[in-house]
Image: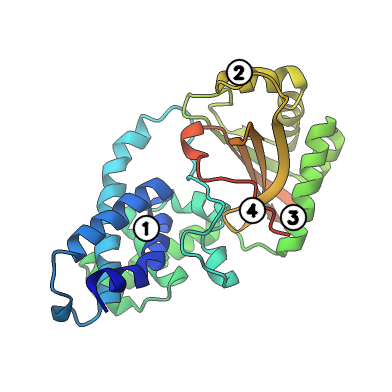
Amino acid sequence: MTTTEVFEEHRSLLNGVAYRVLGSANDAEDVVQEAWLRWSGVDPAEIDDPRAYLVTVVSRVAIDRLRRAASRRESYVGEWLPEPVSDLPDGAERAELADSVEFALMVVLETLSPLERAVFVLHEAFQLPYSQIAQVIGRGEAATRQLAKRARDHVRDRRPRFEADRAERRRITERFLRACLEGDLDGLKGLLADDATLVSDSGGKARAPLRVLRSAHKVGRFLVAVTEERNVTRFLASVGVEGMDDLDIRVTEVNGGPGVLVSAAGDAVIMISLDVFEERVQHVYLLVNPDKLSRLSAVDPS
């Protein structure tokens, strides 16, 4: 195969690794492009394992970019959420790989150090052996295993495994959306865990809470208030949309699971993802930063 053919064979894998490490599809594409530039400058005949070489390059570039992004995220207005996608960045159809890009997990990965995140992604999502991961990150195998253990423990503590299957999560998401649109505070509170939280990401570019809302009562009251027509109109105006004539609201596919997508004139303006455990909504993730919504489209997964 030619140099280009070898790279294209692994492109979807490289996109998947980069997106999971970075939490941004735009940044992931930049990293994969940089990997291509490096790959095009080497002699493929001198590379024993092109897949391992390319994964190493992408992982190292992504780790470096994540480290550089720390200062930018510290100055970010309000809470930071990952960039959601409609299509999985690696085209994966296996459920276990789709789970590794689920939005609630991506949120938890934001709290790991760059090295912990890379090790977690490479081992848990892509089943790379610790010996190979150690070479990727430039650490000994024992140190790599310790990083992996810390990452797993952190993820386990911050995000219990989903008990609901995808059909159940979709049903709860549909009930959640219906309660919001109907202004049904009691219905919402019945879906929310008592200590539910709402995290919104506007980047200071749209109307949304800058701090985390806590408790079913506060989250429910906010959701009922924000879906009133006058407040929806104000929000749309804050992102440059006039009127509600072309508004489309539906449950659709977000990061391999059900989410709520609000579009205006074909452009996504609001995304909501729910973290569901034991048939109750634990966390509501509300994304309204227009810079992070360009990868979403109203794709019906059913």
Q: Is residue 205 visible?
A: yes
Say whether marks 1 and 3 touch (CB < 8 Å). Answer: no
Q: Residue at x 68, y 42 (%)?
A: 196
Residue assigned mark 3:
170
Instruction: Specify the quadrant of the image occupied by residue 140.
Output: bottom left
As rendered, which of 248 and 78 lies closer to the eye?
Answer: 248
Position of 157 relative to 189 (above/below): below
SS class of the residue under badge 2? helix
Q: Position of residue 137 (x, y in %)?
A: 25, 65
User: Is 36 left or right of 45, judged from the image as shown?
Assistant: right
Query: Hey, what amino acid is under mark 3?
Result: Arg
The answer to the question of whether label 1 and label 2 lie on touching residues, with beta carbons closer than 8 A, is no
Disc 1 target residue = 18
Q: Is residue 273 above or below residue 8?
A: above
Between the C-alphas of marks 2 and 4, the distance is 26 Å
Mark sitting earlier along the chain (1/2): 1
Q: Which residue is mark 4?
A: 253
State the CA–CA distance, disc 1 to disc 4: 21 Å
Q: Quadrant of residue 36?
A: bottom left
Q: What residue is at 13 percent from the left and 79 percent from the top?
A: 46
Marks 1 & 4, CB-CB < 8 Å contact? no
Badge 2 amino acid: Ala
Give whichever of discs 4 and 3 has the lower sequence position.
3
Q: Nearer the viewer, residue 66 or 237?
A: 237
- Tell me the kind of residue under disc 4: Glu
The residues bearing labels 2 and 3 have C-alpha atoms spaced at a distance of: 30 Å
- The tag earlier along the polypeptide, 2 or 3, is 3
